[in-house]
Image (spheres, grey):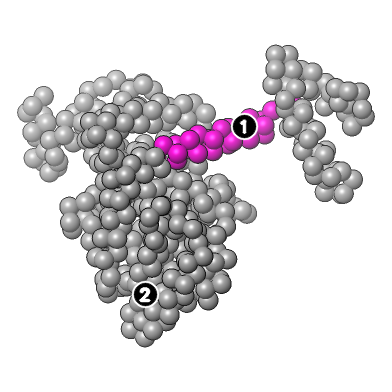
Amino acid sequence: MHSIVKSLCNFHRLSKPTGRYIYKQIQRPYSSEAVVQQLFEGLCAKDRTSLARAITLVETSNAKKRKLAQNLVSMVSADLQKEQDRNKGIPSSFRIGLSGPPGAGKSTFIETLGKQLTGAGHRVAVLAVDPSSNTTGGSLLGDKTRMPRLTVDPAAYIRPSPTGGHLGGVTRVTNDTILLCERAAYDVIIVETVGVGQSEISVSEMVDVFLLLMPPAGGDELQGLKRGIVELADVIAINKSDGDLVPAARRIQAEYLSALKFVRPRLAGWRVPVLRCSARTGDGMTELWQTLTAFRERMTADGQLAARRRRQRAVWLWSQIERAVVDAFRRHPAVRSRLPRLEREVATGRLPPGVAADRLVQLFLEGSGRGGERRAEERSRTGHSGEGVPR
């Protein structure tokens, strides 16, 4: 075994942990449990291929594969918790949420910051979320083409993912993907969302710090107040502060500082800073990273980071419950048989949407108990409720 591992390492220029992992993977018989174990060992060995396969597994909509994904995420979560306990409750990673309107320069900003961090010895994972088309369901997933230098950096990993219709600016499994990246020893996780919007609050419930990136032309201070996303920001950065745009960047910086006087800070004792930077020239990037780390140290020192992560896990528990209930509702036989008729009645104005929704929910609840599915189907066919009122 040792000679084979040594040959693999010498020929392919692999590290010893990666060589041992590949050798074990070749020798192990194939099974569903073996696949999960192989992926877990690959993550522990910092294998990029295993990380890519693991993320693909958790993103699947196949019911059988989703069970394997849940087993893998459970193993990873338990292992990370043991590691955090050994570290006296201090997380080993720093989760950064990044949002901003189109044209703010998010991709260039991530590449510049990422190269700065990998040069300092960090391992950086970028989870770039692209919106899915409501018509075709597809996504461009072109973030790697906008980060050419960071893409080829061995200490960085970029994973573009579609939202798949999930609201909130993130995907259904972004939280699980963060755990997989942490198990693969990436200590800085950057989650780039699809853009600023009132519904884009989910990312703030899965990261340690939320960074809002703005261009030097964001409107007046009233526009800043109207954006609900500003209230979620822990740090605001005005990008593209270079050349002829410096005066505009200074003006928008002053306007946001004025607007933030009317916004209650999320963290007690932390005044949201508004900084200027240029991802193109690198000006202000070092100061911005120092501000982010100062925020993390402040939260870690008084226990607010651990408390925020505990609260976030509870939030995502209910998020998964809501999605599971909606999926079960859509698959229910009685609901599926009655839904087309009720949709036509709602579309023609013969039935209010609220009344139709209540009837479908009643069918779902009646069919969820023992023997209820058969009774719900019978009522759906006859068009009557349990009270004998014609439907």
Question: To which quarter of the image does residue 339 belong?
Answer: top right
Which label was assigned to residue 325? 1
State the residue in front, 87 or 161: 87
Give the image location of residue 156, x and y in percent.
Answer: 26, 52
Q: Amino acid at mark 1?
A: Val
**Residue 85 seen in the current view:** yes
Which label was assigned to residue 294? none
State the residue in front, 27 or 48: 48
Question: What separation in Å lies between label 2 and label 1 (alpha carbons)?
Answer: 44 Å
Q: Amino acid at mark 2?
A: Lys
> What residue is pinned by disc 2?
240
Q: Secondary structure at mark 1?
A: helix
Number of other residues with Cα within 10 Å of mark 2, as a class: few under 14, some 14 to 19, many 20 or more: many
The residue drawn where x is 18% and y is 58% is: 119
Give the image location of residue 179, x and y in percent.
Answer: 36, 38
The residue drawn where x is 63% and y is 35% is: 326
Q: Residue furthest top?
A: 370
Q: Locate the C terminus by quadrant.
A: top right
The correct choice, above or below, for 93 with respect to 326 in the image is: below
- What span is colored magenta in the figure? 309-334
| 355 left or right of 234 in image | right
State the residue in front, 251 or 172: 251
Assign the magenta stretch its main secondary structure. Answer: helix
